[in-house]
Amino acid sequence: MAWDDTASKVWMDGEFVDWKDATIHSLSHVVHYGTSVFEGIRAYNNENGVAVFRLKEHVRRLFDSAKIYKIPIPFTEEEIAEAIKDTVRENGLTSCYIRPIVFRGYGELGVNPLNCPVNVVIAAWEWGSYLGEEGMANGVDIGVSSWRKPAPDTFPALAKCGANYMNSQLAKIEAIENGFDEAIMLDYTGYVSEGSGENIFLVEDGVLHTPSLGSSNLKGITRDSIIKVAGDLGMEVIEETIVRERLYLADEVFFTGTAAEVTPIRSIDRKVIGIGKRGPIAEKIQSTFFDIVEGKVEDKYGWLDYI
Ligand code: PPE
C-alpha cells in the first residue's frame, strides 16, 4: 500500500497529533517573516533494521541554525533525536524522509521575534529520488541560475532556515521554466555555490573538487560524508572556490544532499558534461554511499542510528 500522509501522526511540541490537527495559526510569526529552521533527514530500511543516517549531526545542525537566529529550542538535542526516531516508529515507516522544523509561533506580529513562542514539529513520510529515478541512473540536466546566493553578511548560509529557501525557490522556478531539472547558483562574487537544495562536486582528472564553505553554501552532511568516503576510496578531495566555467569542463559533476543523495549531472546550460551520463567516479561514490546506508558494508563511521 502506498504511504498515506493524511493517516500519519505528527510530533508537535512533545506529543503526537493526527495529521489533520498538525496546524498553526495564520498570524504565527513564521508565516509572516519566515522564522524557521529545519532539517531533512533520511532513514533507510536495511537488513539490520531501520537506520537513521547521521542523526546526531542533523540534530546538531538544527540547534546550530537555531542558535544563529536566537531561537531557543525548548528540548535537548537528545530529546529531539529520540522524538525523530519515535516519529518514524509511530508511523510504522521504514525508508523515509524526516522533517523536523523549529519555528516562531503565534504571539505578536512585528519583526521582533523575541516575544513569540518557539514550536517544534517533526513529520515523516516516504520520499523517493529527489530528482527522479532516471536522473539517479543517467544524470540530470541543470542550468546556472541568474539568481545569486545571498552575500555572507545578509543571510547566513550555515543556518538552514526557511527564509533561505525563498532564494532557492527563485532559482528552482527559473530552472523548471527553462526546462532544467535543477539550478546551480553562484555566490555573490560569482563563484559556484550550490544547487537549490544540494551541494555540488566536480571531478577533474580523478580529483574531487567542491566549493569551500564561504561560497554561501550549506555545510551539507552528505557533502561531509562524501568527502570522507572519497578519501577512504583513495581519492583526493579539494575544497576551494570554483569558477563557473570549470563546471562545463569537468569530467563529471554531481549533486549531494539528503533528499538528492548522490545525483549525477549530465548537462549544464545545455553543454554535455564528460560522457553525457553518470560517470565512473559518480557511480563509485553513489554505490559506496548506498552500500553504507543499506547496511551492505560495515558502518565503520558510525553513521547509522537504528530505530
Ligand atoms: N544545500 C542546500 C541549499 C540544501 O537545502 C541542502 C539539503 C544541501 C545543500 C545538502 O545538505 P545535506 O542534506 O545536509 O547533505 N536540502 C534539503 C531540503 C530539500 C528540500 O527540497 O526540502 C534535503 O536534502 O533534505
Image: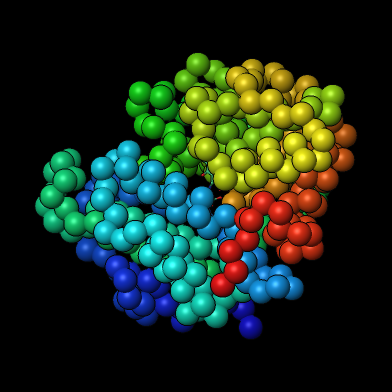
Q: Quadrant of the N terminus?
A: bottom right
Left or right: where 160 falls relative to 233: left
The answer to whether residue 306 is visible is yes
Count of number-bearing discs: 0
Quadrant of the rendered image containing residue 290: bottom right
Q: Residue at x 60, y 58 (%)?
A: 53
Q: Position of residue 237 (x, y in %)?
A: 72, 29
Left or right: where 265 falls relative to 76: right
Q: Position of residue 223 (x, y in %)?
A: 62, 40
Q: Residue at x 77, y 29 (%)?
A: 236
Q: Is residue 195 above or below residue 23?
A: above
Q: Position of residue 260 (x, y in %)?
A: 63, 50
Quadrant of the rendered image containing residue 152: top left
Q: Quadrant of the C terminus?
A: bottom right
Q: Position of residue 32 (x, y in %)?
A: 24, 48
Q: Is residue 67 above or below residue 185?
A: below
Quadrant of the rendered image containing residue 303: bottom right
185 and 99: which is toward the camera: 99
Q: Residue at x 52, y 38 (%)?
A: 219
104 and 85: which is toward the camera: 85
Left or right: where 40 falls relative to 262: left
Q: Residue at x 54, y 18 (%)?
A: 190
The answer to whether residue 270 is visible is no
